[in-house]
Image: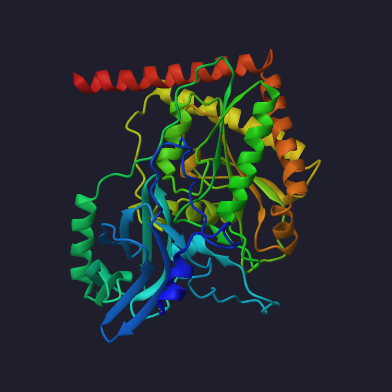
C-alpha cells in the first residue's frame, strides 16, 4: 500500500463515518495534561497460503499482543491494549445464513449474535468470520471464528523497510486434539476480564440500571441498512437515562455508556453493586427467516421458556460472552435454602408486575409483538434480588422496525412510554417510589442473610 494512502487511512478524521466501528470516548482532560494519540488499525486482509492463514491490519504504532485459542465454539482471540479500528462495519462478516424462504430484495440482514453457533464456511483458509472492538476499558480484541481447528503460529507487529507497521496473525491447520490442548492451556492461564462497577447509591432515590445489550467486539444484529444493534440500544439507553434523571425521582446507572463489551455476569453485578431497584436490559433482535415478524417484546426470567422462540432467543443472547472471546460458562449459585428461594420468587413477582405495566404503556405509543410477554432463562436477568426485564425494542429483520429503531422521534416516544411505565410501577407498589426502594432493600437483606446462613453452615 502506498505510504500516502496509508497515511490517509490512519489519519484521524473530523467525524467517524456511519457504519464504522465506534469506540468509547476518551475521558476529558485539562488543556495542560499530556495527550497520547490513539493507536489506529485499518485495512484488514486475509490470505490463505496452503495450510497457513494470514490475517493482517495496517497499524499506526507498535503494541503488545496476546493470541490464544478457545473451544466450543472454536475461536482464536487476539488481545491488545486499546486500539481504534477504522474498519468497515461489514468487514469479517460470515456469509448470510441460508434461508428456506424466497430471497427478498437488497442486502440481507445478518444476525451477528448467532455467529458462535452457526455452521462455519470459510472466508479464507481457516477463518470463518471475525470481528473486533473494545473488550474492556483500555483493552481491545479481535475474535476470529474458525472454520476448522487451527493453532496460532505467530502474532506480532511487523515493520517493513519504509517504516510502515502491520499487525499480523498467522494460523495453521491443526488436528482436533492439538487444538483442544491449546485451548485448555489458554483458558487455564487467561486473566479474568475486568469491568467498571457502578458506585453504591448515595441518595435515597430508587436506582434504575439500564443495560444496553452487546457492545464493543460484540455488534449484536446488523440491519440490511448497516445499522448495528449495539449502537441502537446504546442510544436508547442514554435517552431513557436522561429522561428518568430529569424527573428528579430516580438515579440511573448505565452498564455501559460507550461502545465497550461488558460480560453478562458483570452486567448483573453492576446492578447488584448499585443497589438497583429495577434492571432493564435493552435489545433489538432479528429473525432472518421471518422478516414479517415485528413489534416489541418484554421478557422476564424463568426456569422453563414460555415458548420455542423465547428459548432460542435466550440461548442466543446467553452466547454474548462467547462472541467476545470469553469462555461463556455460566456460574451456579451455591445458596439453596428456603429464604433464598423466597427472595428469588418475590423478585420474579416484581419483575412480572413491571413487565405487565411496560406492555400496557408501550402499546399505547408503538407496536407490540403479537406475543408481547415471554420468558426464558436469560443470564442477564438472573439477579436474585433485583427485579429485571429484557426489553426487545423490535426486529432488525423487519423493514418497519428497522426504520423505527433509528428514528429519533420514535425513540423519544418509546423512551417516554418506558419512563411512564417505571413511574407507574413504583407508584403502584404503595406510597410512591420509596416503598419499592424499601422493598428492594428488603430483598437484598433477605438474600444476604440467606447467603451468610449458607456460608455459616458450610463452615461447620
* Residue 306 horizontal/vertical position (percent): 59, 47
Residue 222, quarter of the rendered image: bottom right
Q: Residue furthest bottom?
A: 50
**Could you say where residue 218 lies in the image, as x and y percent from the top left?**
47, 56
Q: Residue at x 32, y 70 (%)?
A: 166
115 on left or right of 292:
left
- Taking the view exactly as shown, the residue that stands out farthest to the top is 431
In the image, is residue 426 above or below residue 61? Answer: above
Residue 453 image point, x, y percent: 32, 18
- Of 253 and 148, nearer the camera is 253
Q: How is the image coloured?
A: rainbow
Residue at point 42%, 78% (across, down): 123
Instruction: Tell me if residue 94 comes above or below residue 272 in the rendering.
Output: below
Q: Quadrant of the C terminus?
A: top left
Q: Position of 44 compared to 107: left or right?
A: left
Q: Position of residue 71 (x, y in %)?
A: 30, 62
| In this rendering, position of residue 204 left or right of residue 157 | right
Q: Nearer the viewer, residue 114 or 10?
A: 10
Q: How many numbered marks have been drawn onto this rendered protein structure? A: 0
Q: From the viewer's side, name the closer residue of 263 and 245.
A: 245
Q: Residue at x 58, y 63 (%)?
A: 19
Q: Is residue 104 above or below residue 335?
A: below
Q: Is residue 265 left or right of residue 360?
A: left
Q: Tell which residue pokes out farthest to the front in this image.
A: 32
Which corner quadrant holds the N terminus? bottom left
Amino acid at each position: 500500500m502506498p505510504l500516502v494512502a496509508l497515511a490517509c487511512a490512519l489519519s484521524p478524521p473530523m467525524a467517524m463515518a456511519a457504519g464504522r466501528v465506534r469506540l468509547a470516548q476518551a475521558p476529558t482532560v485539562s488543556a495542560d495534561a499530556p495527550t497520547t494519540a490513539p493507536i489506529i488499525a485499518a485495512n484488514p486482509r486475509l490470505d490463505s497460503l496452503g495450510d497457513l492463514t494470514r490475517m493482517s491490519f495496517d497499524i499506526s504504532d507498535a503494541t503488545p499482543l496476546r493470541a490464544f485459542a478457545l473451544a466450543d465454539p472454536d475461536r482464536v482471540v487476539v488481545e491488545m491494549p486499546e486500539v481504534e479500528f477504522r474498519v468497515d462495519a461489514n468487514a469479517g462478516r460470515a456469509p448470510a445464513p441460508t434461508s428456506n424462504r424466497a430471497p427478498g430484495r437488497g442486502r440481507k440482514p445478518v444476525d451477528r449474535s448467532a455467529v458462535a453457533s452457526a455452521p462455519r464456511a470459510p472466508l479464507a483458509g481457516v477463518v470463518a468470520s471475525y470481528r473486533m472492538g473494545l473488550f474492556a476499558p483500555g483493552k481491545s480484541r479481535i475474535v476470529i471464528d474458525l472454520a476448522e481447528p487451527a493453532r496460532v503460529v505467530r502474532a506480532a507487529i511487523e515493520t517493513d523497510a519504509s517504516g510502515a507497521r502491520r499487525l499480523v496473525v498467522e494460523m495453521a491447520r491443526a488436528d482436533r486434539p492439538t487444538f483442544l490442548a491449546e485451548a485448555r492451556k489458554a483458558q487455564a492461564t487467561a486473566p479474568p476480564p475486568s469491568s467498571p462497577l457502578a458506585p453504591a447509591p448515595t441518595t435515597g432515590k430508587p436506582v434504575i440500571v439500564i443495560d444496553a445489550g452487546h457492545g464493543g467486539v460484540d455488534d449484536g444484529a446488523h440491519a440490511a441498512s448497516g445499522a448495528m444493534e449495539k449502537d441502537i440500544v446504546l442510544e436508547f439507553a442514554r435517552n431513557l437515562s436522561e429522561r428518568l434523571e430529569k424527573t428528579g425521582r430516580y438515579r440511573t446507572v448505565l452498564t455501559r455508556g460507550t461502545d465497550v463489551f461488558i460480560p453478562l455476569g458483570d452486567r448483573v453485578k453492576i446492578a447488584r453493586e448499585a443497589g438497583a431497584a429495577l434492571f432493564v436490559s435493552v435489545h433489538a433482535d432479528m429473525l432472518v427467516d421471518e422478516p414479517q415478524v415485528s413489534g416489541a417484546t418484554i421478557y422476564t426470567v424463568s426456569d422453563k421458556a414460555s415458548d420455542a422462540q423465547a428459548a432460542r432467543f435466550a440461548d442466543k443472547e446467553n452466547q454474548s460472552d462467547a462472541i467476545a472471546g470469553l469462555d461463556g460458562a455460566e456460574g451456579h449459585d451455591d445458596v439453596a435454602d428456603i429464604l433464598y428461594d423466597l427472595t428469588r420468587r418475590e423478585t420474579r413477582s416484581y419483575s412480572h408486575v413491571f413487565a405487565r405495566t411496560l406492555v400496557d404503556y408501550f402499546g399505547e405509543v408503538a407496536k407490540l409483538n403479537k406475543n408481547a410477554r415471554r420468558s426464558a432463562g436469560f443470564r442477564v436477568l438472573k439477579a436474585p434480588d433485583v427485579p429485571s426485564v429484557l426489553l426487545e425494542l423490535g426486529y432488525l429483520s423487519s423493514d418497519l422496525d428497522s426504520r423505527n429503531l433509528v428514528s429519533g422521534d420514535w425513540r423519544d416516544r418509546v423512551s417516554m412510554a418506558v419512563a411512564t411505565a417505571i413511574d407507574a410501577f413504583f407508584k403502584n407498589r404503595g406510597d410512591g417510589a420509596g416503598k419499592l426502594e424499601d422493598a428492594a432493600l428488603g430483598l437484598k437483606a433477605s438474600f444476604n442473610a440467606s447467603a451468610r446462613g449458607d456460608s455459616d453452615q458450610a463452615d461447620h
